[in-house]
Amino acid sequence: MLRQYRMFAAYNRWANALVYAAAAELSDAEFRSDCGAFFGSLHRTLNHLLVADRIWMKRFTGTGEAPSTLDAVLYEELEMLTAARQAEDERIVAWAGTLDEASLAADFTYRMVTRPVGITQPLWTALAHLFNHQTHHRGQCHMTLTALGKPSLQLDLIHFLRNEGREWM
């Protein structure tokens, strides 16, 4: 299971880079256009993904910034958001590299953002959510890009594995 989560961290970084490269090709109006995704625009969806990752990483590591709302806009400008995303992805990859099987299996307790109640579950399940959540909202980013008439992105895990991620096969 440990190797799988390290692979997901690498995949996550790769897929985010593709989405951000596509976002960089948009006009500011397109970037901020509400295309019907859960958070509306690509701008707000990418901010949400960074917010959620920071919340989870603060829970996992005890360090870093953790916004108090899931819809916070951390960065108005794509350039700053891109730099913050790259730094967070590197942080996730590095942290995943420190994990061992015992830490993945151990119980993990945190407080929800939406309701301040404690939740206890095995760390591996929370980590699975982190990566699944990224995939879920990247799908909304993809939908937003195609709704704006942009080319479809190849974000499949198997595409990553067959190309840039061959070390994980």
Image (spheres, helix red, strand yellow):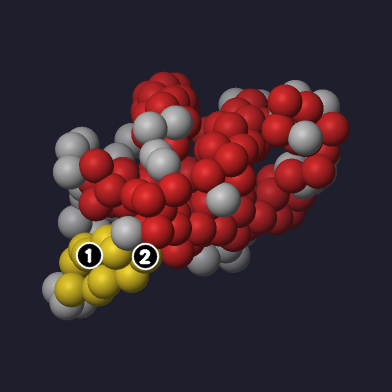
The type of residue carrying mark 1 is: Thr
Residue at the disc numbered 2? 122
- Disc 1 or disc 2, which is closer to the eye? 2
Of the pair 63 and 150, the residue shown nearer to us:
63
Foreground pick, 73 / 117: 117
Where on the picture, by quarter, is residue 71?
bottom left
In the picture, measured across the screen, residue 110 lies left or right of residue 150, that is left
In this view of the protein, can residue 144 be seen by the observer? Answer: no
- The secondary element bearing badge 1 is classed as strand
Q: Residues within 10 Å of mark 1 (few under 14, many from 20)?
A: some
Q: How many marks?
A: 2
Using residue 124 as the reference point, say whether residue 147 is left or right of it.
right
Residue 93 position within the rendered picture, expressed as x and y whole percent measured from the top left: 46, 31
The answer to which of marks 1 and 2 sits earlier in the sequence is: 1
Vertical order, 25 against 63 (above or below): above
| Residues at circles 1 and 2 in contact by the CB criterion of under 8 Å | no
| Furthest-front residue in this view | 102
Q: Residue at x 57, y 51 (%)?
A: 1
- 19 or 57, which lies in front? 57
Dot 2 lies on which element? strand
Determine which of the numbered discs, if any, sits on residue 25 in the image.
none
- The percent coordinates of residue 61 (x first, y second) are 24, 42
Q: Amino acid at mark 2?
A: Pro
Residue 151 percent location from the top left of the image: 82, 39
- In percent of the image, x 38 and y 32: which residue is there? 98
Whether 130 is drawn above or below 119: the answer is: above
Provide the residue designation for mark 1. 109
